[in-house]
Amino acid sequence: MKLGTKIILNIAISIVICTLAAVAISSAKIHAQGRQQLVEKSRAILSRLESIRTYIATQGGLESDINKALTTFPDGDLSPEMRDRILRKVPIFASIKVGFEGAEKDDYKFRVFSDEPRRKENKAILSELEILKRFDADPKLPEIVEETETQVTVYRPVRLSEAQGCLLCHGAPATSPWNNSKDILGFPMENWKDGKLHGVFAVTSSGSLAQRSATSAKEISNLIHESSTKVEQGHTVVRASEASLKEIVATIEQLSNLNKEISTASHEQEMGIGQINQALSGMEKITQNNSASAEECTAASEELNNQSLIMKSVVSQLTKVVSG
Ligand code: HEC
């Protein structure tokens, strides 16, 4: 494999790994966010139920209704209307009612449980007893959140409040309106005190599918955007490395050119030396020739000299002859 291909392959693999990591992180985020939303939803429902309890308590009228029932039904056999009227004045009753009624509409599960319930359906199961124990051990513990793969349950303690009239029914049997240790509705009074943990509200949310898929869709589109940005960044990296690869190739080319140049130069140098040698030998020849010609020249000029001397004597003899 070529070095360039290797580098590009490495970069490509890095991009794939980065994208996968981004997908993994984002889906973990989606999951965590989804969980958090479910926790918030459960909390909102519980807070609503607590507000209802406070609201009904501020409305008052429970004691006067109890007194009315006592006088209207002195035998203790309350009409269903009167039972209903009293229960409507019990703060926690409205909370429990709304808790159950909203469950289907708002897609959650509601449960109230106790280790000593009045209603047997509310009897705590083993895991719920653990929750009760934890709230009992720490009166300041505001809530417990339990998460499974698919759902979130938020637990909140339900404590009795004397101020809200809880002890009129759950309090000391000696205070029984019928003087028979039973409350106005005929239930045995438990002799519980103010602040006693009677039960726990549990709201389990698995979230509406529509809500979750909407959030997921949004998250995924963000994710795709993020990934494409990353891929773009990756491209830039590839382009950048392409450029540096080109630079490297260019440098290598330059190097080989340089090499060629050097070898050419040395060849040329060799040739040059040869030429110089040739030139030198040529020059030698020329010099030799020159010296030869010089000798020839000397000889010739000597010859010429002799001949001019001869000519001179010939001319003077001729002049003597002419002038007489
Ligand atoms: C008028 C009497 C009365 C008063 C006052 C009253 N309760 Fe109760 N409570 C009941 C009855 C009756 C039930 C059983 C309801 C049922 O069968 O659904 C009950 C049930 C409950 C439960 C559900 C667990 C169980 O025992 O089955 C809780 C929790 C509770 N009460 C807490 C409170 C709190 C807190 C207050 C004060 C805000 C309060 N109650 C005031 C009569 C009363």
Image: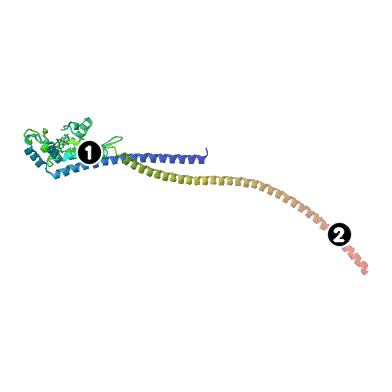
Q: Residue at x 89, y 65 (%)?
A: 316
- Residue 189 is situated, as x and y percent measured from the top left of the image, at 11, 34
Magenta stretch in the rendered image? 303-311
- Mark 1 lies within 8 Å of ligand 1 (Cβ measured): no
Q: Hey, which residue is sitting farthest top in the picture?
A: 126
The tag on residue 307 is 2
Most common secondary structure along the magenta stretch: helix
Circle 1 Cα neighbour tier, 10 Å, few/some/many (<14 / 14–19 / ≥20): few
> Which corner quadrant of the figure contains ligand 1?
top left
Measuring from the top left, give residue 111's x and y in whole percent.
22, 35
In the image shown, does 314 or 279 lie closer to the viewer?
279
Q: Is residue 57 or residue 302 the one in the foreground?
A: 57
Residue drawn where x is 46% and y is 45% of the image: 235
Q: SS of the residue at dot 1? A: helix
Residue 140 on image: x %, y %: 19, 40
Q: Quadrant of the C terminus?
A: bottom right
Question: Given the image, on which type of amino acid does mark 1 rest?
Answer: Glu
Residue behind mark 1: 101
Question: Would you say 15 lies left or right of 275 here?
Answer: left
The amino acid on which the numbered mark 2 sits, given as a three-letter code, is Gln
Q: Is residue 9 left or right of 117 when viewed as pictured?
A: right
Label 2: element kind: helix
Is 310 colored magenta in this rendering? yes
**Label 2 neighbour load within 10 Å: few <14, some 14-19, many 20+:** few
Residue 296 position (above or below residue 8): below
Q: Across the whole image, how many numbered discs are drawn on residues?
A: 2
> Does the rendering let one see residue 194?
no
Magenta stretch encompasses residue 266: no
Q: Is residue 52 visible?
A: yes
Rendered view: 145 above or below 302: above
| Residue 238 locus on image (x, y percent) | 47, 44
